[in-house]
Image (spheres, helix red, strand yellow):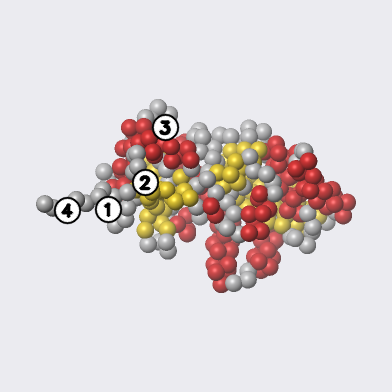
């Protein structure tokens, strides 16, 4: 079967979220806001075929395609999934490479091993594991394990009078100015500059299309100045993804405050908050572990094994 993939655009939100929001997949890669705001980097495309959502994107300097785990509508069977995997494999082989699926969770792997026993190589990618927390934990910071976080917030409150406000079009320019300052302070090498530039482009696009992407955002304002902001979007029916968090570190405790306030203002329907991966950055890993994730969601690359060739007799 030849799959007619099409580029992901804002107009495709309903078609894609009809699959992702009812699903139980919690990984940040299935956030429509992420797919759309990062499409410039990965040329992300999608297709809906026989009740399955199929997602394809480019990796390795856009030299080859990779795919996400197919998501089927309710009622789809293991045999149906095996057929969807076959479509992806045909597409990948037609483009010159064995099938490679990224973001494969333990749940996904169990499905693949049931439909394709010993059919894939699995390569865990620790830098891309998702940090998933209970929303209530982040919002309340109750218990001894969160005492250091509460101390940071209390010290912040002693030093500053602040207000929490939702991100609206009126304050987007101030948020972008804070991000510009943050970018300048954190740009230390050519490699970092490229990575941060990509993030900056994605962030700017998202803020300028917040309503269409169904973003929820919040900011901390001190003496009329935005000193921290965060935003994200739903991943599925019970998991909210935090895609961006920035703060002026000259205001000690600003990151802790925006983290807690943002979680406290999320709708209670979201049991989990996915704060995405750490990209192997030591400081970021330490910070995310310090919030005691309820789930450290393992993600692997799954590479389809090619049939062994038997010598001609």
Q: Secondary structure at mark 3?
A: loop
Residue of label 3: 73
Please report whichever mark, 2 or 4, sits nearer to the chain's N-terminal start.
2
First in residue order: circle 2 vs circle 3:
3
- Alpha-carbon span between mark 1 and mark 2: 18 Å
Q: CA distance from mark 1 to mark 3?
A: 26 Å
Q: Residue at x 32, y 52 (%)?
A: 98
Task: Name the N-terminal-most of marks 4 and 3.
Answer: 3
Residue in the image at 45% along x and 39% along y? 108
Q: Give the structural element (helix, strand or loop) at label 1.
A: helix
Q: Is residue 23 left or right of residue 143?
A: left
Q: Earlier in the sequence, mark 1 or mark 4?
A: 1
Q: Which residue is mark 2?
A: 120
Mark 2 and mark 3: span between their CA atoms? Answer: 24 Å
* Image-quadrant location for residue 188: bottom right
At 43% from the left edge and 37% from the top edge, which residue is drawn? Answer: 110
Report which quarter residue 283 is drawn in.
bottom right
x%, y% of residue 297?
A: 55, 44
Q: Nearer the viewer, mark 1 or mark 2?
A: 2
Kindly give the residue lying farthest to the front in the view shown: 313
Label 4 element class: loop
Viewer-nearest residue: 297 or 222:
297
Instruction: Compare marks 1 and 3 and give the one earlier in the sequence.
Output: 3
Q: Residues within 10 Å of mark 2 (few under 14, many from 20)?
A: some
Q: Which residue is mark 4?
A: 311
> Given this view, does label 1 or label 4 mark the residue nearer the observer?
4
Q: Quadrant of the N terminus?
A: top left
Q: What residue sits right under mark 1 in the picture?
A: 94
State if disc 4 and disc 1 touch (CB < 8 Å). no
What's the CA distance linking mark 1 and mark 4? Answer: 24 Å
Q: Is residue 253 toward the left or the right of residue 19 in the image?
A: right
């Amino acid at each position: 079967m030849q799959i007619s993939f099409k580029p992901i655009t804002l107009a495709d939100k309903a078609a894609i979220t009809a699959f992702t929001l009812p699903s139980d997949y919690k990984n940040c890669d299935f956030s429509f806001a992420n797919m759309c705001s990062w499409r410039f980097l990965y040329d992300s495309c999608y297709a809906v075929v026989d009740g399955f959502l199929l997602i394809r994107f480019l990796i390795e300097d856009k030299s080859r395609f990779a795919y996400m785990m197919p998501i089927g509508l309710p009622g789809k069977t293991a045999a149906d999934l095996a057929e969807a995997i076959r479509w992806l494999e045909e597409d990948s082989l037609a483009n010159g490479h064995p099938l490679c699926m990224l973001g494969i969770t333990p749940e996904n792997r169990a499905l693949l091993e049931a439909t394709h026993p010993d059919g894939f190589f699995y390569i865990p990618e620790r830098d891309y594991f998702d940090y998933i927390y209970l929303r209530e934990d982040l919002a309340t910071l109750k218990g001894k394990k969160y005492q250091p976080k509460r101390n940071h917030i209390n010290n912040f409150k002693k030093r500053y009078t602040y207000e929490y406000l939702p991100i609206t079009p009126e304050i987007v320019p101030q948020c972008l100015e804070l991000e510009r300052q943050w970018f300048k302070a954190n740009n230390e090498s050519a490699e970092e500059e490229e990575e941060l530039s990509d993030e900056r482009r994605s962030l700017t696009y998202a803020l300028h299309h917040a309503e269409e992407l169904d973003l929820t955002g919040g900011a901390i304002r001190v003496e009329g100045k935005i000193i921290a902001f965060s935003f994200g979007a739903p991943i599925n029916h019970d998991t909210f993804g935090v895609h961006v968090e920035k703060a002026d570190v000259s205001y000690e405790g600003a990151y802790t405050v925006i983290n807690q306030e943002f979680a406290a203002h999320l709708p209670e329907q979201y049991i989990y908050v996915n704060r995405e991966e750490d990209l192997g950055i030591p400081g970021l890993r330490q910070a995310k572990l310090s919030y005691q994730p309820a789930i450290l969601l393992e993600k692997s690359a799954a590479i389809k094994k090619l049939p062994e060739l038997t010598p001609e007799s």
